[in-house]
Image (tube, helix red, strand yellow):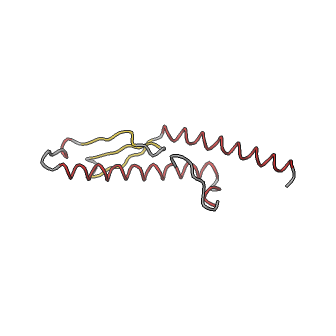
Amino acid sequence: MSKLNMGNLLKQAQQMQSKLQKIQDELAEKTVEGSAGGGMVTAIANGKNEVVRIKIDKEVVDPEDVEILEDLVVAAVNQALKNAQEMASSEMAKATGGMMQNLPGGLNFPGM
């Protein structure tokens, strides 16, 4: 590979890295929801797979049966995190034209 080709390849890699960092920053600002119990428990997560808020309907709070509430919170959080991962994957695929999906072993980005 010539020096010119190697230089272009490095420049493209730096541009891609910059683009991916920008997307990660944008994903931190985007949120998705997951809910359980017919919407009685809702978890909101951002594109970095961080739960940022939990909403619980007062009707589901029963001091005599905390286990149901715990199960609903876990289900809502898991759904929100799944939705966040799907959103992040979709945004990355758009930005890279699907290139990252074709790489052997893929690339591992923090929070993705």
In the displayed structure image, the side of residue 109 where residue 52 appears, left or right: left
**Where in the figure is residue 99, as x and y percent of width and height?**
65, 56
Q: Residue at x 32, y 41 (%)?
A: 54
Q: Is residue 37 above or below residue 14?
A: below
**Where in the figure is residue 77, as x and y percent of width and height?**
35, 49
Q: Quadrant of the N terminus?
A: bottom right
In the displayed structure image, the side of residue 36 where residue 68 appears, left or right: left
Q: Residue at x 83, y 50 (%)?
A: 5
Considering every residue shown, the one lying at the far left of the view is 64
Q: How many marks?
A: 0
In the displayed structure image, the side of residue 4 where residue 41 appears, left or right: left
Q: Residue at x 81, y 46 (%)?
A: 7
Which quadrant of the structure image shows residue 101? bottom right
Which quadrant of the structure image shows residue 50? top left
**Where in the figure is residue 8, as x and y percent of width and height?**
80, 47
**Where in the figure is residue 86, as x and y percent of width and height?**
48, 53
Q: Residue at x 53, y 46 (%)?
A: 110
Q: Nearer the viewer, residue 6 or 81?
A: 6
